């Protein structure tokens, strides 16, 4: 990914020197939407509060036809790489922060363009860098939780040591594999501000664990598809290199529920899946990337 020299987002909060170390065996607090890691594969991938239900209802909430989202207007996304972002964040102090800030800026540009194409305003999320452990509006979390999104404060939380784990433990190397992880969590933010997450956080209370897990898979796969939509428009800017998308697809494969469970415990428990199988995650990521249309990310009305 040709990311150097591009705009960096000012919406990155660097709390690495404040969050401290330590391990929390709970893996994360309630309400978090995270990438599953470590021994928690297949165990509560949403750390206590499992999102259930998924309907492609952006149009239902905002009063427009979702089938028209990005229909033939995809090419109108603007490359804002020369513009300065808002906010009060400090300048990047290291290469990893620069990379994360650049990827976040690219998601901001893409989603702002998508929302504007439909007469809507996009609210940028914040991304918090932390080390070891952090407290969010969704509760306390340690690095064991992996990257996560908290709907309560509209923030993505990332301990960048996860990228080392992604490479060394999971076999998913490359900067675009890392970019995919960030774009997936931003996908949860899109779901949140369009009203999908709040709506179905309520519905989940009426469902049993098995049904909740099934619907959680659907919402996670939509976030993967949204990450693919972002990759589609990033590719149109000419900043993807050969092999980048393969890196992202490999990352999706390595963090599938079935692959993680087999790696961590030697067997799989399909009824406990809550993020999707490796094949499902790759399929929906690729689908978003191929079309660039949110209407192709309807994981409720299509087989997953």
Image (cartoon, rainbow, N blue to C red):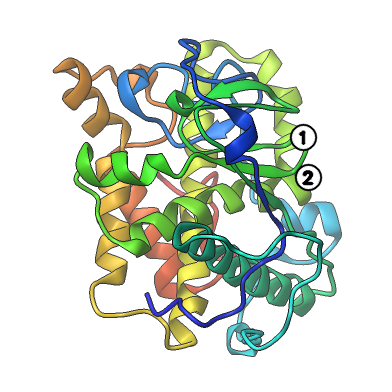
Q: Is residue 252 left or right of residue 236?
A: left
Q: Residue at x 57, y 39 (%)?
A: 16
Q: CA distance from mark 1 to mark 2?
A: 6 Å
Secondary structure beneath label 2: loop
- Residue 279 in view in this figure: no
Q: How many marks?
A: 2
Check the picture and name the quadrant holding the N terminus: bottom left
Picture layout, residue 198 above or below residue 171: above
Instruction: Where is residue 235? Give x, y as percent.
Output: 43, 80
Picture layout, residue 127 above or below residue 131: below
| Nearer to us in this view, 98 or 146 | 98
Secondary structure beneath label 1: helix
Q: Are marks 1 and 2 in contact (CB under 8 Å)?
A: yes
Instruction: Where is residue 239? Give x, y as percent.
Output: 42, 83
Instruction: Where is residue 245? Give x, y as percent.
Output: 31, 68
- Residue 233 in view in this figure: yes
Residue with the mark numbered 1? 198
| Nearer to us in this view, 81 or 59 | 81
Q: Residue at x 71, y 85 (%)?
A: 83
Residue with the mark numbered 2? 195
| Nearer to us in this view, 81 or 269 | 81
How many other residues sit within 10 Å of disc 2, few (<14), some (14-19) or many (≥20)? some
């Amino acid at each position: 990914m040709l990311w150097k020299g591009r705009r960096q987002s000012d919406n990155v909060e660097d709390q690495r020197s404040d969050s401290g170390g330590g391990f929390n065996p709970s893996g994360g607090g309630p309400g978090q939407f995270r990438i599953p890691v470590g021994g928690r594969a297949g165990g509560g991938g949403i750390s206590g509060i499992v999102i259930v239900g998924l309907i492609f209802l952006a149009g239902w909430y905002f009063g427009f036809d979702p089938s028209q989202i990005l229909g033939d207007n995809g090419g109108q996304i603007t490359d804002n790489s020369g513009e300065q972002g808002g906010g009060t964040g400090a300048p990047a102090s290291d290469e990893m922060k620069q990379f994360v800030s650049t990827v976040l800026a690219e998601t901001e540009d893409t989603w702002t363009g998508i929302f504007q194409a439909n007469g809507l305003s996009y609210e940028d999320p914040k991304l918090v860098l932390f080390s070891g452990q952090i407290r969010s509006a969704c509760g306390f979390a340690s690095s064991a939780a992996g990257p996560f999104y908290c709907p309560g404060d509209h923030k993505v939380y990332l301990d960048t040591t996860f990228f080392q784990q992604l490479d060394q433990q999971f076999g998913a190397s490359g900067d675009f594999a890392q970019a995919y992880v960030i774009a997936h969590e931003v996908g949860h933010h899109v779901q949140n501000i369009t009203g999908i997450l709040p709506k179905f956080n309520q519905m989940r209370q009426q469902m049993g664990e098995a049904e909740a897990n099934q619907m959680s898979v659907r919402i996670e796969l939509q976030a993967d598809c949204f990450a693919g939509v972002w990759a589609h428009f990033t590719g149109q800017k000419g900043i993807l290199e050969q092999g980048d998308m393969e890196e992202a697809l490999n990352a999706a494969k390595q963090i599938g529920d079935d692959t993680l469970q087999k790696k961590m415990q030697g067997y799989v428990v399909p009824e406990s899946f809550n993020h999707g199988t490796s094949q499902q995650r790759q399929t929906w990521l690729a689908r978003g990337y191929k079309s660039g249309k949110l209407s192709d990310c309807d994981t409720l009305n299509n087989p997953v």
